[in-house]
Image: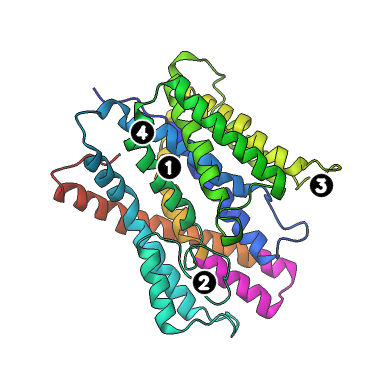
């Protein structure tokens, strides 16, 4: 008997991906300043993705052990995730080489760039390149979270799948203490993608991924309001759109807000979404949004880099720049749709057939 499907969570994954594209496109273009620096907290979408990933991994794989080996699990996850890692790194290299607006200082010697590309293909932290000195994934910035995703999957297969809900809650609580401390010390959770704050990456992963596993394990024991896709997406939008909060004395209100979103709001949204159903009219949208979210997340940043360099080089007026941003966001969605249907799904289907008809979760 086929498993039930969490259609609203699919739709929310698409909503979060679109909001993070909005965050990158508007903030990079307006240099994180002014009223058009929209959804300033949308970096928290990564934490939301981590929690969703834990929930979905537990849903897809908890009942497949011990019939499935650890290696079979890794192979399934590689088939699911790595084709787009390779494509994202390649698109990032091409953008870096052919960006017509990139300043002259954004230059990297060919041997170093080749090494960076190789490291990007392997999803390892890469050396710096010109113009992007702090990014751990210099050719495709958002890929930093995929490296953490791989670490989360590794921990799930080796240890976390064996833990009972109470033990998962303890692990999540310990990680949450570290996360709250980091948020208080730095003033936000907007870190982990960069070398100066690379230590925040495993904290963000451990807290939200383990929390997602725990949420799935307790999902059948609790009841939450059935709010549906639109109200929950609006709640995410409001959460991301609130301005950064100024500190009060020695207290980081912004760090406290980020921590509260991760530990309280996002679990609430996930549990409400897991208990919600959609009508037939919204079913196709949720399904497509969920499918599109990963290609959109992993392929959009190159277009944003070009857009930001254009804004820096030509200093267009606000109406023209906003029009350009909306055009780039539309282009990103179109390209992600083509990547999904012409590359990602066909390649994953071929790999699944190649490896004994594996069912890719």
- Which stretch appears magenta? 302-322
Q: Secondary structure at mark 2?
A: loop
Pair 1/2: label in front: 2
Q: Are marks 4 and 3 in contact (CB under 8 Å)?
A: no
Name the dominant secondary structure of the magenta segment. Answer: helix
Residue 332 image offset from top left, x and y in percent:
49, 60
Confirm whether residue 302 shows in the render. Answer: yes
Q: What residue is shown with label 1?
A: 290
Task: Judge from the rendering whether residue 97 lies leftward or rightward of residue 340; answer left or right.
Answer: right
Q: Secondary structure at mark 1?
A: helix
Q: Are marks 1 and 2 in contact (CB under 8 Å)?
A: no
Q: Which mark is residue 159?
A: 4
Q: What residue is shown with label 3?
A: 246
Viewer-nearest residue: 38 or 180: 180
Q: Is residue 136 above or below residue 43?
A: below
Confirm whether residue 15 shows in the render. Answer: no
Q: Is residue 97 above or below residue 198?
A: below
Pair 3/2: label in front: 2
Between marks 1 and 2, how big is the CA–CA gap?
A: 32 Å
Quick one: label 4 or label 3, which is nearer the N terminus? Answer: 4
Quarter of the image holding residue 27? bottom right
Residue 215 image offset from top left, x and y in percent:
48, 26
Q: Quadrant of the N terminus?
A: top left
Q: Secondary structure at mark 4?
A: loop
Q: What residue is shown with label 2?
A: 128
Pair 1/3: label in front: 3
Residue 285 image offset from top left, x and y in percent:
45, 40
């Amino acid at each position: 008997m086929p498993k039930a499907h969490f259609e609203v969570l699919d739709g929310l994954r698409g909503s979060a991906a679109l909001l993070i594209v909005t965050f990158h496109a508007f903030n990079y273009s307006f240099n994180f300043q002014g009223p058009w620096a929209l959804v300033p907290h949308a970096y928290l979408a990564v934490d939301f993705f981590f929690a969703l990933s834990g929930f979905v991994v537990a849903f897809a794989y908890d009942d497949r052990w011990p019939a499935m080996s650890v290696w079979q699990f890794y192979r399934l996850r590689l088939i699911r995730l790595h084709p787009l890692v390779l494509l994202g790194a390649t698109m990032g290299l091409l953008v870096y080489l052919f960006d017509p607006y990139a300043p002259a200082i954004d230059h990297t010697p060919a041997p170093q760039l080749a090494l960076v590309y190789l490291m990007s293909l392997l999803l390892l932290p890469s050396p710096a390149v010109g113009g992007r000195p702090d990014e751990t994934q210099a050719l495709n910035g958002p890929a930093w979270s995929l490296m953490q995703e791989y670490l989360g999957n590794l921990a799930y297969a080796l240890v976390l799948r064996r833990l009972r809900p109470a033990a998962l809650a303890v692990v999540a609580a310990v990680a949450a203490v570290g996360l709250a401390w980091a948020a208080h010390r730095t003033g936000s959770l907007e870190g982990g993608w960069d070398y100066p704050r690379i230590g925040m990456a495993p904290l963000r992963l451990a807290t939200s991924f383990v929390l997602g596993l725990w949420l799935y394990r307790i999902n059948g024991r609790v009841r939450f309001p059935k709010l549906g896709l639109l109200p929950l997406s609006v709640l995410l939008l409001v959460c991301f759109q609130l301005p950064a909060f100024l500190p009060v004395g020695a207290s980081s209100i912004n760090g406290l807000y980020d921590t509260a979103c991760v530990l309280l709001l996002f679990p609430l949204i996930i549990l409400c979404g897991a208990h919600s159903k959609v009508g037939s009219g919204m079913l196709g949208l949720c399904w497509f949004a969920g499918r599109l979210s990963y290609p959109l997340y992993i392929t959009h940043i190159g277009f944003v880099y070009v857009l930001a360099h254009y804004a820096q080089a030509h200093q267009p007026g606000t109406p023209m720049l906003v029009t350009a941003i909306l055009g780039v966001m539309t282009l990103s969605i179109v390209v992600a749709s083509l990547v999904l249907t012409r590359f990602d799904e066909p390649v994953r289907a071929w790999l699944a057939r190649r490896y004994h008809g594996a069912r890719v979760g």
